[in-house]
Image (spheres, coloured by chain):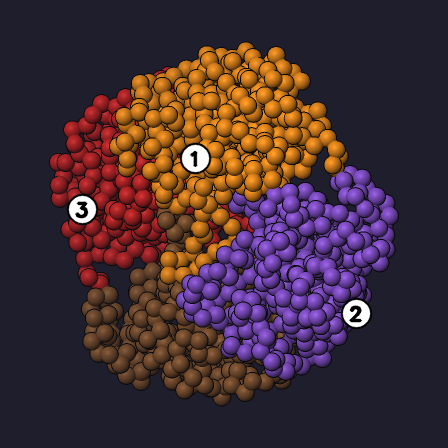
Chain colours: A orange, B red, C brown, D purple
Amino acid sequence: MGGVQEVRIGIVGLGRLGMRHAENLAFRVRGARLEAACALEADRVQSVCRDWGVPRGYTRFEDLLADPGLDAIFIASSSAEHCAQVRASLDAGRHVFCEKPLGVTLEECRDAEEAVARNPGSVFLLGFMRRYDSSYRRAKALIDAGRIGKPILFRGYSVDPESAIQGAIRFAPSSGGQFLDMSVHDIDLARWMLNAEATTIFAAGGCYAHPEFAAHGDGDNLAAFVRFDSGAMAFFLAGRTAAHGYAVETEVIGTLGTLRIANVPQKDLVEVLDSHGSVKECSQSFLERFEAAYHAEAQEFVDCIREGRRPGVTVQDGTRATEVAFAATQSFRRDELVRLTPLTPRRSA
Amino acid sequence: MGGVQEVRIGIVGLGRLGMRHAENLAFRVRGARLEAACALEADRVQSVCRDWGVPRGYTRFEDLLADPGLDAIFIASSSAEHCAQVRASLDAGRHVFCEKPLGVTLEECRDAEEAVARNPGSVFLLGFMRRYDSSYRRAKALIDAGRIGKPILFRGYSVDPESAIQGAIRFAPSSGGQFLDMSVHDIDLARWMLNAEATTIFAAGGCYAHPEFAAHGDGDNLAAFVRFDSGAMAFFLAGRTAAHGYAVETEVIGTLGTLRIANVPQKDLVEVLDSHGSVKECSQSFLERFEAAYHAEAQEFVDCIREGRRPGVTVQDGTRATEVAFAATQSFRRDELVRLTPLTPRRSA
Amino acid sequence: MGGVQEVRIGIVGLGRLGMRHAENLAFRVRGARLEAACALEADRVQSVCRDWGVPRGYTRFEDLLADPGLDAIFIASSSAEHCAQVRASLDAGRHVFCEKPLGVTLEECRDAEEAVARNPGSVFLLGFMRRYDSSYRRAKALIDAGRIGKPILFRGYSVDPESAIQGAIRFAPSSGGQFLDMSVHDIDLARWMLNAEATTIFAAGGCYAHPEFAAHGDGDNLAAFVRFDSGAMAFFLAGRTAAHGYAVETEVIGTLGTLRIANVPQKDLVEVLDSHGSVKECSQSFLERFEAAYHAEAQEFVDCIREGRRPGVTVQDGTRATEVAFAATQSFRRDELVRLTPLTPRRSA
Amino acid sequence: MGGVQEVRIGIVGLGRLGMRHAENLAFRVRGARLEAACALEADRVQSVCRDWGVPRGYTRFEDLLADPGLDAIFIASSSAEHCAQVRASLDAGRHVFCEKPLGVTLEECRDAEEAVARNPGSVFLLGFMRRYDSSYRRAKALIDAGRIGKPILFRGYSVDPESAIQGAIRFAPSSGGQFLDMSVHDIDLARWMLNAEATTIFAAGGCYAHPEFAAHGDGDNLAAFVRFDSGAMAFFLAGRTAAHGYAVETEVIGTLGTLRIANVPQKDLVEVLDSHGSVKECSQSFLERFEAAYHAEAQEFVDCIREGRRPGVTVQDGTRATEVAFAATQSFRRDELVRLTPLTPRRSA
């Protein structure tokens, strides 16, 4: 499995996260070969090609798509482009990795679902990287093994650090709102861990520190309380004002026990005892907190291609999380309960 | 302030908590003298009088009330008797401490309010003991000092240990439901810490482990999501199935920081490292967790009487917490949003 | 056991700790009656008598000793007076509680031992209050139950907060050195928990921040490594410069597990998440950390008198801890191994 | 820096740790190319070559050394072979990475030092991987920035899990004893963090659970108390019986604060609350705890070669740590203080 059968990958999108993906693909993912990089910024493409030895660079997605020497496309472009690039790449016979969110409308999500369906030979993986984090994986395994009994409540916080607030405000017009941008990971985790679908939602929140979000029907902190078809409940908090860092914290309470993941999102194993007391510093960004998970999901994508396996995350997971995020947004904006229509059963196993 | 002016107290109710109160009043509360004890169980009255040197014992509340040598009545009887005993004691010119809940109907609460209003010379303290716990007091002081900025979300869990489930099931018909019995403390804390009143509620939950609660329109785990008139939010979880112990945990998230109280309700400062990993045992009951708070609230009651002060907890706090608990129960039972009518402003300072 | 048979107590010494003891005895110790208070400072005696209703006050120990209405003497005077007061009180037929240290020389300790021996009807309790702390008690019970197997290493830190350094420097000439003043509690805990006696000691340390201690053959931080006759080891750190508070931390490593007590000496159950990360404040003084233990040891003293029991802490425990502290001091001063002569077996059970 | 100038590496030793190194070099170290693998076990060499695409395999070190297509040799063979292979590789013009320990005698260490000295063009890195762990790196940076003031005490525990005891017993005859095998990392960390050299040592310990170690002048748990030339102190615990896992824990106490690294060596960010209380599982092996550090040190080795830099860990660090480990062993065996002769100053910067 060594030198042969390497998966030849082209990446599109070289923002902060795209660069991390590219570097992983270039140097750390076993069985992967980063053959091409594409971004609007020609300078960035050039330096990636030169510094990391990537053979081909493009500034137009069409050119990347036309590159005959690629087995897979890794999509880390802006959210609005995801769906079209997913469809085009799949229909061009490529395997596809797509960063979250799957789409910015439900129509887009369904288009992507159809593209996946009509290309059964292609591996498709959506970047819900938390499922590849070792702590979340162990938590899921403990739940599946019955360690906490029947799940009662899932609680997921995803709050960006206040230090990143200026970027969040600039991004507000196109972010889709806190539930789509921040909670979508928690919604996916809740569906995965509860093995159930959301049915009823009530959301609230507002602008507690930064009035700029209001103009976009958004707030700097929103929360949603959700009932699932299994009877379990979920509570999501999405925000932008965490003082202590990248505050992604998850809890699952069951009838026999409770699991917490990153209750304190400590950055490492250092504790300082000084005049403040006992102090543990926290992770400051998604890149720091989920560094290993980004690596693991890329490895899983490549392994699935090489081994002919299907990833655990499906395109439907993307659609469903988006639906719930939209329903929560609607509940917040209209100040009313939102009830989701029952699905034909298609939840992930 | 030594030997003179001791407050002569009669207690009614010698259940598990009543015994603790009685012992505190008999031996540990400075300025208090436990002069009389009253309970339905004659044996228990006798042993308290004999073993703890309490001069007078009664088995009927009327006799306690008629005792001319008492300055104050300490009510630890069953919930259904609270309000009538509060009214009678106040109208008899006694200072009154009353265990929570203030009443089992809102009418009762309002009757109690009126009795307090027409007896301005009497000290009335409702047993929201958490306000006298050193951790909650420090948290409140930090909030008031602006340490966490503007409050965004209050989260309060009150889950009894699974080990006490049989008692909880027996108590279910008369408990008033999880929100009244368990969350009422959290509701009071939320009003106190957010300095705001609840306006909109959505509740859910069910019987995840113990179907017996369903017959009483109750569940073994319920949760409510609440919006307050300040814009802040609250999330309450009330339950009966905590595996790790008496799971009372509180969080207040603000724009500048987050406070957590008893995130792990550890029973002491011992940590065991063994084949399970790092293990901290938890408090197993309210008496264990709030031992010092029960002592402090009794001390505060006596100090208020001796110093002519008013306690921080008012009778209105009891009514308002009850209203919110009832609204949450209604939301759960009807599966609908409940909006509370605005109050004439009377929140506690 | 209520009003009758109360133990009538006189206290000598009304410093910071003496005041705490006096207040406990006056108001919170069941079965105790504080009948007399004695201190050099006449003003303090007066205010204690007036404010706390203590009937009789003295400024000379001889007068306290001559008070015929006392069953017990509670000694909280300065260390240099302990032994003489212990002897005189016992020989006057009183029960005696004595704050640590038992004495400032070994001769004094042996004199105290003899006084205890010749007054078998008197209860004698030495103020090793940690043995009455709920965390240490549970740890000891876990060890005795075999939970951690055979003890390998005891580690005890006792470091005062830097905020108290000026007092420590003033006290340095008469403190007996860090091992006697600070580690004596750890030495007692080690003997108690290991159920063994020290045999070999090597100590080191120095003045890392405060050169003033050097003039007294002392340092601001000293440590000793000790071998016990069971084969177990102990490591003691005694110091004055803890930034985070009153740093009393204990660990016992056994063949089947490890126990830690107050690894972080958190003052309560509050955790703050802010720009520093996750922060837990620490206890700032022995009065704060051991508030409940001081209460419990006084209660145990009174209960032993009333019930005709012997306390678990013996006068020999005081002597032996002092011997080890002196040996550690000698090792530090001479930079050499010190071997303790074997004892005729008299360790506590 | 991409495809060109890759460092061609041959590894010798394919045990548990060697396999991990080989896999890192083959797939995850940027700028590295694993060109050859050598081990006594021909099967293992074959499978590594076949599965990981390594071009050349050898079963004799001489053949690896004679391979003209290698820039560097990565030594992960058994301890007894380290020094000879270091010398031969350096003298053959190769860059050398060598797993700890540098040698099993001081003569060997000095031979290695000379070989490094006479090959100034070669990069030499000794596998003190903890220096490349993110937590230790941050701790070191905090110390250097003065965050904890002047160091007073370094405490380092290195205790293998009881679950690995059979291997430890088999390995006992050739391990060099607990101080050389386990504490050598702590000794290196102490020298690095205290920036000082050991001067006086007293060690103790024994066989608390496993008498088999006694035959080799060793114990299952040993501890050493060490004075450094800066006045700072260190306490090392080395053992084989940790119930909770791979118990590597470090503390540095300074005049202004205290640092702890892996006080609880938690394996991830999961916490379970169940009938045991709050439970955090721990890392179970060095490969688990230091996975990222093994990767980072290999990356640093390759980066140093490519960038013409010198690593922070020197061959002298290996010698000096070995000297201290030997002195501790001698102290334990002879039950006496051991004083180390002063060094001509050569401590690492």
Instruction: Compute the Cα span from label 2 to label 3.
Output: 75 Å
* Mark 2: few/some/many CA within 10 Å (<14, 14-19, 20+): few
Please name the residue that numbered disc 2 is placed on.
Answer: D216
Dot 3: element? loop
Q: Residue at x 51, y 74 (%)?
A: D232
Instruction: Return the residue at label 3.
Output: B310
Point out the frontmost of discs 1 and 2. 1
Picture coordinates of residue D4, whole percent (x, y): 65, 45
Mark in the foreground, 1 or 3: 1
- Identify the residue under disc 1: A158
Chain identifier of the residue bearing label 1 in the image = A
Q: CA distance from mark 1 to mark 3?
A: 42 Å
Contact, mark 1 vs mark 3 (Cβ under 8 Å): no
Of residues C194 and A287, the one nearer the viewer is A287
- Tell me the amino acid under the disc marked 1: Ser
Q: Is residue B310 left or right of residue C23?
A: left
On the question of residue B150 being in view, the answer is yes
**With respect to residue D200, does A169 lie above or below?**
above
- Percent x, y for residue A53? 60, 40
Q: Mark 1 and mark 2: span between their CA atoms?
A: 55 Å
Q: Quadrant of residue D146?
A: bottom left
Q: Where is A173 relative to B131, above or below? A: above
Residue B25: x and y, percent?
A: 31, 52
Q: Secondary structure at mark 2?
A: helix
Amino acid beneath label 3 = Arg
Instruction: Give the residue displayed 59% in from the left and 60% down from the top.
Output: D309
Judge whether D282 appears above or below A21 on screen.
below
Q: Quadrant of the N terminus of chain A?
A: top right
Q: Quadrant of the C terminus of chain A?
A: top right
Q: Is residue D120 placed above or below B308 in the rendered structure?
A: below
Q: Residue at x 50, y 18 (%)?
A: A84
Residue plotted at (16% across, 28% down): B344
